[in-house]
Every structure is written in structure tokens, then in C-alpha cells.
Image: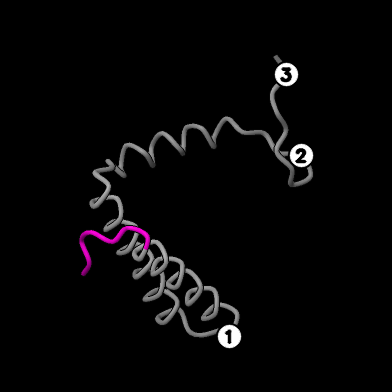
């Protein structure tokens, strides 16, 4: 695996997400879709490592932010000040 070319890794991650979507569109089996999702996770974790990002902390923070979001008819509603 590459350890220095972040733009290339992001492109490869995009490719893995595309492969996952393609497998889902083609109604591939759960095994193939899960393997594609595993590739997405591997590239994501690798990028976090390359960028010295504590992904666990970032995920927990993002979940907390998302829990406070309000959606109406599928659209995000900004809280009133």
C-alpha cells in the first residue's frame, strides 16, 4: 500500500465507493457488496493513518453533530437562534 500519495489514495477510495455502488446497482450478493465495503473501510482507515487523524474521535464527534440535526421532508433545517 502507498504511504505518501494522499491524492492517489483519495482517488482509489472513490473507486472503491464506485465499485460498491455498482455492486449494489447490479444486485450482487451480500458477500460481494460486503467485500467492497471492506475495501472502502480499508482505504478510509489508511488515509486516516497517513493524515494522523484519530478516526474514532472524529466519528464520535460527527455522530454527536448528526444527532442534533433536524430534517423536515428530507431537508436539513437550521435551528433558530
Q: Earlier in the sequence, mark 1 or mark 3?
A: 1
Residue drawn 28% across the image and 42% down it: 53
Q: Percent x, y for residue 27?
A: 57, 84
Q: Quadrant of residue 26?
A: bottom right
Report which residue position mark 2 lands on. 72
Residue drawn 27% across the image and 41% down it: 54
Residue at disc 2, secondary structure = strand
Task: Tell us which disc is closer to us: 3 or 2.
Answer: 3
Question: CA gap, disc 3 to disc 2?
Answer: 14 Å
Residue 80, which numbered label?
A: 3
**Crowding near pointer 2: few (<14 within 10 Å), some, many (20+)?**
few
Q: Locate the N terminus by quadrant.
A: bottom left
Left or right of 72? Residue 41 is left
**Crowding near pointer 1: few (<14 within 10 Å), some, many (20+)?**
few
Question: CA gap, disc 1 to disc 3?
Answer: 43 Å
Residue span colored magenta: 1-7
Residue 26, which numbered label?
A: 1
Amino acid at each position: 500500500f502507498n504511504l505518501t500519495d494522499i491524492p492517489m489514495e483519495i482517488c482509489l477510495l472513490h473507486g472503491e465507493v464506485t465499485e460498491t455502488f455498482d455492486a449494489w446497482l447490479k444486485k450482487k450478493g451480500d458477500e460481494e457488496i460486503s467485500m467492497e465495503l471492506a475495501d472502502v473501510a480499508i482505504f478510509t482507515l489508511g488515509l486516516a493513518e497517513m493524515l494522523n487523524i484519530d478516526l474514532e474521535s472524529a466519528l464520535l464527534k460527527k455522530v454527536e453533530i448528526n444527532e442534533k440535526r433536524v430534517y423536515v421532508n428530507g431537508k436539513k433545517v437550521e435551528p433558530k437562534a
